[in-house]
Image (cartoon, rainbow, N blue to C red):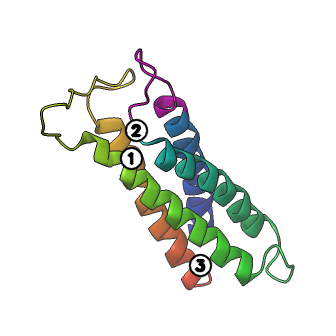
Amino acid sequence: MSPEIIVWVLSFLGAVVVVLTRVRLGKELDDGTKPVSRTILTVHTSVGLVAVVVWTLFLVFPPSSTLGGDLVGVAGLGLWWVTVFAGLGLLLRWLPSRGRHTSSLSEDEWAEGPGLSLLAHAGLLLGVLVFTWAFATGTV
C-alpha cells in the first residue's frame, strides 16, 4: 500500500476519533456534570475539526497552490499535535483518584474501561507521527 493511501486512511480515522470522542464524552451524567474536563474536550473537538479541514485541504490541493503549500501543511500538523495532546489529556481521567471526595468512574457504554479510548488516542498519536514523517520526507 502506498504511503499516500496510508495518510488518507489515517486522516479519515483521525476524524472519526475526534467526532466519536465528542459524542462519547460530551454527554452529561445524571448529576449534570461531565465525566471529563469540558475545556480539554472542547479543545480536542474544535482544534481536531479544524485540523481535519486544514490537513484535508493540504492533501487535496497541489503543492504549487497556496492551500497545498508547506505553510498549510505545517499548520495542519500543528493542529493535529494539539489534538493529540488534548486526547492524551482526556485519557488522564482513567488514572486512579484518591481522596475523601472522589467517586469511582462509571464504565463506558461502548466498552468496559479505558480500552477503546486508549486504542483511539494511541492510534491518533501514531497517525500524527506518520503524518509528520510523510510531510518531512515529502511523501505528501
Of callouts 2 and 1, the N-terminal one? 2
Spatial CA distance of label 1 from label 3 is: 27 Å
Q: Do we see residue 54 in this rendering?
A: yes
Amino acid beneath label 1: Leu
Q: Nearer the viewer, mark 2 or mark 1?
A: 2
In front here: 97 or 122?
A: 97
* Mark 1 and mark 3 residues within 8 Å of each other at the beta carbon: no
Amino acid beneath label 3: Phe
For residue 68, side relative to residue 82 (left or right): right
Of callouts 3 and 2, the N-terminal one? 2
Whether 126 is drawn above or below 25: the answer is below
**Image coords of residue 108 (percent x, y):** 34, 25
Start-end of magenta stretch: 23-35
* Mark 2 and mark 1 residues within 8 Å of each other at the beta carbon: yes
**Image coords of residue 3 (percent x, y):** 56, 68
Q: Which residue is mark 2?
A: 36
